[in-house]
Image: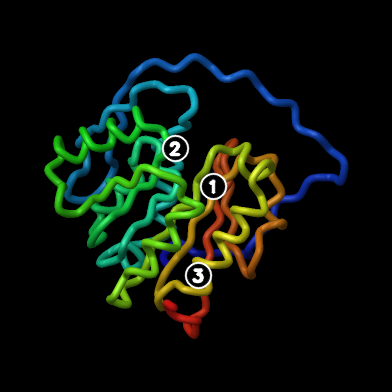
Amino acid sequence: MAGRSGPRTRSSRKSGETKTKRPLKSIGPTNLRIIGGSMGGRQIRYNGQRSTRPMKDSVRENLFNVLGKQAVQGAVAWDVFAGTGVLGFESLSRGAARAVCFETNRPMARSIHEAVKQLQVEDRLRVVIGDAFRMLPQLMTREEEPVPWLVFVCPPYVFWDEKQKELFEMLRWVAAHAPQGSVIVTETDAHWDMAQLPMEPWDIRRYGSTQLGFYEPPALCAGLD
């Protein structure tokens, strides 16, 4: 994977230490820019819903720099908690074959649909409205060709505490069934201890208040059942 240099690091937090929750800032509608690739410079609309936290441009750029071209080109991108869908669009722009965006919030899903039409990628990006914990394995098992997956697990930060068991089960399932050459990417805030993540080894990168984890499932995996 391009950009992988230096020792792998794990974040840590003292036992018993608690994090003070900050109130959500008011966010208005804005445009998000696709950074690189064939659609670089094009924009998609973010409706400003406070339940969604779009990844900062600088973090997204670093994410794809770490992945490099080889991990993206020809892959199927699974944006598990899509929000704006920008990771799916960025993946397509950089050469992914297809993208699937999961979103439970219907207004956000409609925004992704509008961006799909605007960018004319109806044949390459699918929007799935529903529970990703339940639906992701169902759709992944329908994949017939062993094309590498690029799986973005970037949920609301609170999920890493409130839905930790479900997230860990999802990560283990994806790692056990992913075709060779796949990569899993997680996103948390800088206070969450990524040493808790299942499987080894994770390449942890910190960008300000955001942490990204990169995991490459073993070449010999269980395969789709």
Assign a secondary structure to mark 1: strand
At label 2, counting other C-alpha atoms closer than 10 Å, the crowd grade (few under 14, some 14-19, many 20 or more) is some
**Mark 1 and 2 residues: CB-CB less than 8 Å, in contact?**
yes
At label 3, counting other C-alpha atoms closer than 10 Å, the crowd grade (few under 14, some 14-19, many 20 or more) is many
- Report the residue at 52% width, 70% height from top: 175
In space, the residues marked 2 and 3 are separated at their CA atoms by 22 Å
Q: Nearer the viewer, residue 10 or 215?
A: 215
- Report the residue at 35% width, 35% height from top: 84
What amino acid does circle 3 point to? Glu
Q: Position of residue 125 (x, y in %)?
A: 23, 50
79 to 189, vertically: above or below:
below
Picture quadrant of residue 141: bottom left
What amino acid does circle 1 point to? Glu
Quarter of the picture containing the N terminus is bottom left
Assign a secondary structure to mark 3: loop
Residue at which label 2 appears: 55
Q: Residue 89's mark?
A: none
Residue at which label 1 appears: 187
- Report the residue at 28% width, 36% height from top: 112
What amino acid does circle 2 point to? Met
- Looking at the image, tell me whether mark 2 or mark 3 is earlier in sequence order: 2
Q: Residue 216's mark?
A: 3
Q: Is residue 213 left or right of residue 35?
A: right
- Report the residue at 28% width, 76% height from top: 145
In space, the residues marked 1 and 2 are separated at their CA atoms by 9 Å
181 to 67, vertically: above or below:
below
In this view, the residue farthest toward the left is 120
